[in-house]
Image (cartoon, rainbow, N blue to C red):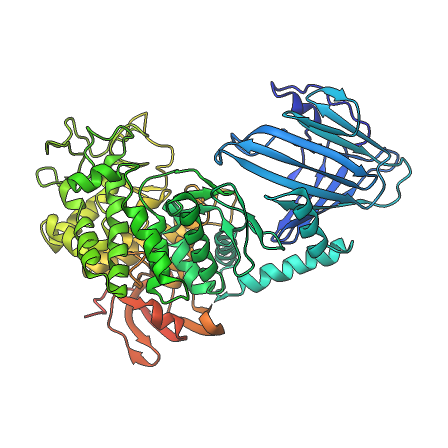
């Protein structure tokens, strides 16, 4: 783009003067590689990466002076620069940092970049104003590198990144990208992704379904993300630099979303990551005093409700992964015993009264704490802390306080025991009522830790099934203030948001597997596809796709820390799942078709398996699971 003047564009943001449109026809996007032509400048940009570094290739039009602009002002979403710095160290090396605030309140990224060609002119800008010299500290910071006019080759740029320092960014870069082989790096990235995506191999004649599956699997692998320099340094939750080479540190924990299916999926196909994820969570607890809620770039965002780190860590411990169980238990217990985010009221009353909880969302928060307590109780039992087991098991019954037998719904309740007046099970007021991104219809079922107890509350199996049936056909006005996250509706079931993802499998748990198959089949075939609008809601760091991956294989974890996967409706004729110890778990669906969506019989390793579920241990051992399918629902389990 040469010596381009940074002039105001057509929108209020002055930086639009440097933006460019592009044509989708020129775009190539795949795992490990991206390419596009920038229409305004005629530049082809190609990108690939290693774990800690980016590798760029820019091909400039003939006769134009080539140049690159480094934008340190803008981030993603509402992330805003607090402070930034850039310096041209020599004619091929530029470094700096960007400190910003947004979802992560104090996010810092250091970088060091090396150009393949010498920079002829380097300019620095504070907004539209060019400043003297080749270094600058500012909030609206830009650096412009201009190259020789007669370049006959593309300009390559290698950029290393770190949350610790510019020196670490350089070390990361030189370790992972010592040479200038862009094509070789792109091939290596492709091979790395292919290796990971081959952890599940499916056989199907449906090309679109195959594309949907592997796109979803790719989505589940983007996070947690690496947050650890090659020398062992990382930025902790206490904002201090720590050094530890005994494990790999991670970040980007959207746990309210991912504890439901994405994290259990990780325990199946990424066993090598699981102990390090657990250690990361334990270290976060030790540095900030509690397990992560929604952690990003070393920052606790406290986004969403409940204690979602507890079921994740509990699941890892209960599945027997090699972790410091005592340290993990301490982290879970102390996180459950804090006095923040409604926990003080929860401990005092056994639930969270809406009249005492100024943060709203009292029911959602209480239900999330209850299911976390159940998972913590199971760990306490495993480790021999029997008093703790009894205490947290009792706390896991908090849902009972919220149930109103008159209306048949879970409702907000006051400290005096009165249910909130003017109740409408359809209505949703985003961040202004007793629920979180949902309504009473959707939250009634958030008791995965005690489905039998919920069945009793609703009047027994028949009444429970009738209520579920109504959920999937009920129509009502949620109101103008409803959360925009409530999407993918089938009646009042909202597949586009996470709290209800387990609901279709409740049918099978009470003896109606055919109805589970009906709903799961409808969701798999109508709410996922291979178009740009192929999801019914926010991906939420892999959870939306994790539901598809697990459900399409034929099972799903209703209770995330329970170690059991409930059978539903397998979509593919054959699946090979690579699990712990490099063993293979084969899944075969005989006589499978769109019409034959009902399981007739299940065989596990040559033996009839008349059960509604399969254990994590059974899958982890490898072997063969066979579904025999038909066009009529049958009760295939005891």
The quarter of the image holding the N terminus is: top right
Relative placement, left or right, of 485 versus 97 is left
Q: Is residue 298 above or below residue 604?
A: above
Q: Residue furthest bottom?
A: 606
Q: Nearer the viewer, residue 469 or 540?
A: 540
Drawn side of residue 521 relative to residue 529, left or right: left
In the foreground, 415 or 332: 332
Above or below, 608 relative to 471: below
Asked whether residue 64 appears in the rendered view, the answer is yes
Question: Residue 318's quadrant in the figure?
Answer: bottom left
Query: Which of the two residues, 238 or 159, is positioned nearer the viewer here?
Result: 238
Does residue 632 lie above or below 397 as drawn? below
Residue 598 location, x and y as percent? 29, 64
Direction right: furthest residue:
150
Residue depicted at 30% across the width and 58% down the height: 517
Residue 476, picture quadrant: top left
Quadrant of res 254:
top left
Give percent across and percent down for residue 285: 40, 48
Image spot of residue 370 (x, y percent)? 23, 48
Provide residue 147's location: percent of width, then percent of height.
85, 36
**483 relative position to 277: left or right:** left
- Asked if one can make out residue 472 in the rendered structure from this viewpoint, the answer is no
Q: Is residue 95 above or below residue 587?
A: above
Residue visible at 63% across and 53% down in the picture = 32
Viewport quadrant of the C terminus: bottom left
Measuring 68% from the left and 27% from the top, which residue is drawn there? 137
| Total count of labels | 0
């Amino acid at each position: 783009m040469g010596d381009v003047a940074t002039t105001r564009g057509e929108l209020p943001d002055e930086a639009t003067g440097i933006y460019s449109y592009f044509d989708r026809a020129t775009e190539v996007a795949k795992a490990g590689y991206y390419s596009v032509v920038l229409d305004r400048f005629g530049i082809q940009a190609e990108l690939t990466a290693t774990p800690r570094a980016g590798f760029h290739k820019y091909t400039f039009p003939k006769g134009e002076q080539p140049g690159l602009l480094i934008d340190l002002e803008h981030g993603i979403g509402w992330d805003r620069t607090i402070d930034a710095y850039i310096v041209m160290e020599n004619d091929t090396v530029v470094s700096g940092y960007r400190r910003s605030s947004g979802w992560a309140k104090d996010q810092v990224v250091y970088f060091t970049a090396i150009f393949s060609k010498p920079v002829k002119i380097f300019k620095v800008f504070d907004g539209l104003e060019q400043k003297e010299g080749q270094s600058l500290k500012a909030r609206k910071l830009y650096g412009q590198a201009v190259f020789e006019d007669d370049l006959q080759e593309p300009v390559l740029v290698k950029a290393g990144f770190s949350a610790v320092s510019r020196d670490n960014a350089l070390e990361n870069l030189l370790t992972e990208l010592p040479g200038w082989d862009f094509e070789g790096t792109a091939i290596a990235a492709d091979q790395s992704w292919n290796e990971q995506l081959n952890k599940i191999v499916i056989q199907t004649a449906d090309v679109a379904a195959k594309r949907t599956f592997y796109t979803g699997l790719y989505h589940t692998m983007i996070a947690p993300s690496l947050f650890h320099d090659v020398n062992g340094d990382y930025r902790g939750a206490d904002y201090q630099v720590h050094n530890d080479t005994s494990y790999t540190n991670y970040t980007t924990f959207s746990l309210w979303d991912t504890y439901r299916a994405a994290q259990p999926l990780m325990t199946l196909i990424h066993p090598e990551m699981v102990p390090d994820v657990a250690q990361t969570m334990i270290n976060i607890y030790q540095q900030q005093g509690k397990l992560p809620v929604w952690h990003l770039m070393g920052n606790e965002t406290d986004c969403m409700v409940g204690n979602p780190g507890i079921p994740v860590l509990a699941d890892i411990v209960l599945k027997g992964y090699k972790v410091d169980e005592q340290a993990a238990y301490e982290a879970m217990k102390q996180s459950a015993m804090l006095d923040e985010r409604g926990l003080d009221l929860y401990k005092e009353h056994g639930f969270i009264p809406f009249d005492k909880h100024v943060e709203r969302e009292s029911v959602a928060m209480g239900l999330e704490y209850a299911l976390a307590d159940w998972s913590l109780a199971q760990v306490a039992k495993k480790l021999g802390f029997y008093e703790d087991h009894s205490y947290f098991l009792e706390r896991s019954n908090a849902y009972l306080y919220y149930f109103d037998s008159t209306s048949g719904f879970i409702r907000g309740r006051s400290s005096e025991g009165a249910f909130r007046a003017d109740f409408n099970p359809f209505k949703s007021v985003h961040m202004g009522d007793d629920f979180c991104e949902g309504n009473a219809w959707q939250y009634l079922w958030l008791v995965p830790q005690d489905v039998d107890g919920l069945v009793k509350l609703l009047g027994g199996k028949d009444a429970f099934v009738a209520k579920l049936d109504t959920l999937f056909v009920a129509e009502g006005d949620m109101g103008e203030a409803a959360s925009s996250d409530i999407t993918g509706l089938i009646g009042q079931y909202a597949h586009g948001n996470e709290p209800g993802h387990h609901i279709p499998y409740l049918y099978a748990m009470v003896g109606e597997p055919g109805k589970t198959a009906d709903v799961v089949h409808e969701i798999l075939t109508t709410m996922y596809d291979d178009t740009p609008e192929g999801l019914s809601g926010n991906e939420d760091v892999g959870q939306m796709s994790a539901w598809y991956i697990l459900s399409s294989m034929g099972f799903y974890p209703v209770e995330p820390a329970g170690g059991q996967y409930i059978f539903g409706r397998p979509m593919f004729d054959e699946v090979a799942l690579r699990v712990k110890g490099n063993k293979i778990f084969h899944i075969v669906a005989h006589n499978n078709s769109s019409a034959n969506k009902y399981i007739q019989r299940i065989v596990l390793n040559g033996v009839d398996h008349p059960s509604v579920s399969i254990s994590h241990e059974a899958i982890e051992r490898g072997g063969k699971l066979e579904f025999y399918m038909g066009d009529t629902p049958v009760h295939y389990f005891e």
